[in-house]
């Protein structure tokens, strides 16, 4: 795997993507594993590299909302949400236009496609340089911890992909919030709190985050998991567990000593990576996580932690 660095690495990464190669790149949420979304063979390489179930759709990344309208039909709610939150950590699931040219593997056979305009300037520079929609799930093995640094990508996917564009640590640290608009249904909690979306819409969101049939990325019950099992009930501490603390609960490491949910979201996946490494080094068999308030970004953090702690398939 080649490690590319900006600014020269942007052109090299774009050339690799246009050639059907796999390139991981940073967004404000997490690192994405990119492939040309119009190239079915390139998209198939994503599934192979991640070991991802083929029924789990991918998010298509675009540099601006105008390019999104060329691929999908946008109703009034979708346009209002795009105007309010793009670029940013919001993914909209929208009806795919006939002849849009998106490979069928991207949508996993659905008649909708998940679209996002990332806020990270480096990501948009890359997307403009590619000149094509880029499909990009999180750059990690399927079901494992998402990557928020280039080193996480290299640790998880070395030998499986062609390059990583190193843009440093991701600012938000949680995957995007996913919404199906007109009328709005929340499909995945994420880096944009639901309250901000509800303020634009003027009504409470319906939630459908773990349906019987997967409609969007991140809806599998077991996901985001480190190698060691995760336990969210710390009422009984065990000597064979690494503890991830939060606020007043001190641990071997902490999501936020001050109890700041924004800091906790940004550090969540890096903390899980570090805790997993610490568990291996100590010969421990579990990772315990201190309680997180279930409000604002805390709901998205708890969503990831519940999926990380779910029974493995």
Image (cartoon, rainbow, N blue to C red):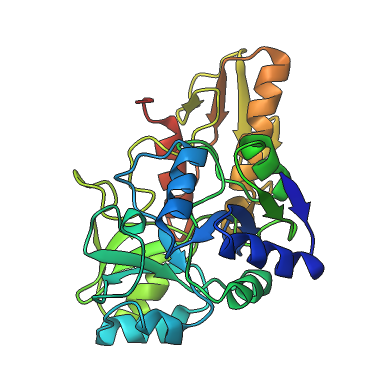
291 and 100: which one is in front? 100
Instruction: Pick the residue in front: 145 or 261.
Output: 145
From the viewer's perspective, is residue 138 above or below residue 157?
Answer: below
Number of marks in picture = 0
* Residue at (38, 30) in percent of width and height: 310
- The x and y percentages for residue 282 are 71, 15
Horizontal side of residue 93 vs 36, given as left or right: left
Residue at the image point whose x is 54% and y is 57% from the top: 20
Identity of the residue drawn at 73% across and 43% down = 151
Above or below 149: residue 135: below
Q: Position of residue 27 (x, y in %)?
A: 60, 63
Residue 197: percent from left, percent from top: 37, 74
Q: Nearer the viewer, residue 209 or 252?
A: 209
Q: Is residue 250 visible?
A: no
The quarter of the rendered structure image containing the C terminus is: top left
Identify the image quadrant of the N terminus. top right
Residue shown at 56% from the left, 25% from the top: 287
Taking the image as drawn, is residue 140 in sight? yes
Q: Position of residue 142 (x, y in %)?
A: 46, 38
């Amino acid at each position: 795997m080649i490690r590319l660095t900006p600014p020269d690495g942007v052109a090299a990464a774009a050339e690799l993507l246009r050639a059907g190669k796999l390139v991981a790149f940073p967004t404000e949420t997490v690192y994405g594993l990119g492939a040309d979304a119009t190239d079915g063979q390139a998209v198939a390489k994503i599934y192979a590299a991640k070991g991802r179930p083929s029924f789990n759709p991918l998010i298509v990344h675009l540099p601006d909302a105008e390019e999104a309208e060329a691929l999908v039909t946008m109703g009034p709610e979708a346009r209002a949400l795009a105007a309010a939150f793009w670029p940013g950590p919001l993914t909209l699931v929208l009806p795919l236009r006939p002849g849009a040219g998106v490979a069928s593997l991207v949508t996993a056979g659905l008649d909708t496609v998940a679209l996002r305009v990332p806020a990270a300037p480096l990501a948009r520079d890359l997307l403009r340089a590619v000149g094509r929609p880029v499909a990009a799930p999180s750059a990690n093995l399927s079901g494992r911890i998402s990557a928020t640094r280039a080193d996480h990508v290299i640790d998880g996917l070395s030998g499986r992909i062609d390059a990583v564009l190193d843009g440093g640590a991701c600012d938000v640290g949680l995957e995007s919030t996913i919404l199906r608009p007109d009328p709005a249904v929340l499909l995945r909690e994420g880096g944009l709190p639901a309250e901000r979306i509800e303020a634009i819409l003027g009504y409470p969101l319906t939630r459908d985050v773990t349906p019987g049939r997967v409609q969007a990325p991140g809806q599998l019950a077991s996901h985001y998991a480190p190698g060691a099992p995760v336990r969210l009930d710390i009422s009984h501490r065990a000597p064979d567990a690494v503890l991830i603390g939060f606020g007043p609960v001190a641990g071997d490491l902490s999501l936020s000593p001050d109890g700041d949910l924004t800091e906790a979201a940004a550090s969540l996946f890096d903390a899980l990576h570090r805790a997993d490494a610490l568990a291996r080094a100590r010969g421990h068999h579990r990772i315990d996580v201190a309680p997180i308030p279930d409000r604002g970004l805390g709901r998205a953090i708890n969503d990831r932690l519940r999926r990380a702690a779910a029974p493995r398939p």
